[in-house]
Amino acid sequence: MDFHEFRLSNGLRFIYLPWQGSVCHTALVIGAGSRDEGPGAHGVAHFTEHVLFKGTAKRKMYHILNHLDSVGGELNAYTSREETWVHGSAPGEFLERSLDIIADITLNSTFPEKEVEKEREVIIDEINSYEDQPGEMVFEKFDEVMFGKHSLGRSILGTPQSLEKIGRAEILEFTKRHYQPSISVLAAVGQESPAKALELAEKYFGSWQDAGVSLSRRKPKVRRDAHVVKNRDAHQAHLAIGGEALSWYHPDNRTLALIMNYLGGPSLNSRLSYILREKHGIGYHAEANYQPYSDCGYFSFYVGTDRKNVDRCRKIIESEIRDLHNGKLKGNLLREVKRQMKGQIVMARESGGAVVNYLAKSALIHGYVETPEEIFRELDAITEKDIARVSRLVFRPEEFNSIEFY
């Protein structure tokens, strides 16, 4: 990945990868999300992201929505616990158009009062739609079980009640405090030369200035051995089990990621998918997730199954954990697991959108971009003893939290 790292005049990091593909991709990631909301502003980060598209000092809503769509491209945004993303894709010759619109809505949005009021109802409808999808809602409720009243345990969307307390003033306050170049990264892949891309980035983002407000986060106290059952009068049961894990900066972060990919990654041959679905036929869908944050993290195992099989699924998961404790992941199997994860990384590099997101995320977290070659060396260095040690460090079934949706 022959990418180039720059600093704009205002300190904003800019990562650019010359790309011979026919599409250019641009992403701005701001290092603030739902966990950074102040008291009484639950949901403001996601609300703000929605109303970025409603008007700027020089563009009305229609012109924003039309800017990339009119050339066959797309513009979108999303909010996570610790980040806000604004990203766009377009035919290769429209990199400047993409940078222009992303800068405009991020730096110059006016948040018209009328549009704020309309969008509140749209988000409430989004919240209600999640309530109709227990397979999605179980993850949100699991966050509540894990983190309690800490901001990491709250819905990113907010609640209908909390959104009623948020208006234009709260949105302006959030952007003033958190939309800052010092905690953001801009990344792009495109056909322009690095010098031209830097010139365009400076043109559209160079005027962005810090507000001088430091980001402050309170580390959560993660619950242990908490169990919740939600009855929803549905046929399928949804089971989530998990506990506290490692932060982005823990030295065993990569080892845990490898373990979780083996247990329940996206491949059809993941261990839990094979055991629960293919071997025993008791789980329609099984996955393992590892979510690191800046100061903590958590892992979870999810199974969609019949009510009568919930306890059996739980026992199978715990059995797989014991096997890891006892060193089952070793030898040829460990080599195959490493090879599979490397292959997934290589495959992801074929997508320009995935590449630009990776460049931005890596630079935001580490302050530099980790190359695939660096990641491969870390994976190669992981030993059988490391797997067993990290498994025992993180997976303690007697402390697992769980939630069951019926």
Image (cartoon, helix red, strand yellow):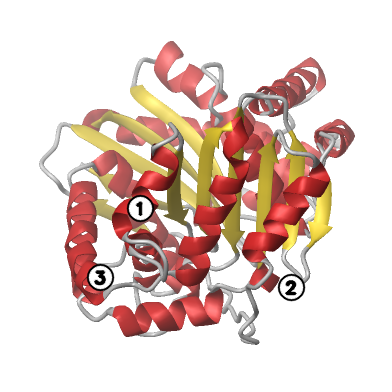
Secondary structure found at label 2: loop
In the image, which is nearer the foreground, mark 3 or mark 2?
Answer: 2
Disc 2/disc 1 C-alpha distance (Å): 28 Å
| Residue 55 placement, left or right of 233 | right
Q: Nearer the viewer, residue 334 or 100?
A: 100
Q: Nearer the viewer, residue 141 or 17?
A: 17
Secondary structure found at label 1: helix
Q: Nearer the viewer, residue 171 or 193?
A: 193
Q: Position of residue 287 (x, y in %)?
A: 47, 33
Q: Position of residue 145 (x, y in %)?
A: 38, 61
Q: Residue at x 51, y 44 (%)?
A: 88
Q: Is residue 36 above or below residue 143?
A: below
For the C terminus, which image quadrant? top left
Q: Nearer the viewer, residue 81 or 267?
A: 81
Looking at the image, is mark 3 or mark 2 earlier in the sequence? Answer: 2
The amino acid type found where label 3 is placed reads Val
The amino acid type found where label 2 is placed reads Asn
Q: Is residue 179 above or below residue 261?
A: below
Looking at the image, is mark 1 or mark 3 earlier in the sequence? Answer: 1
Within the image, what quadrant is residue 117 found in?
bottom left
* Res 116 label: 3
The amino acid type found where label 1 is placed reads His
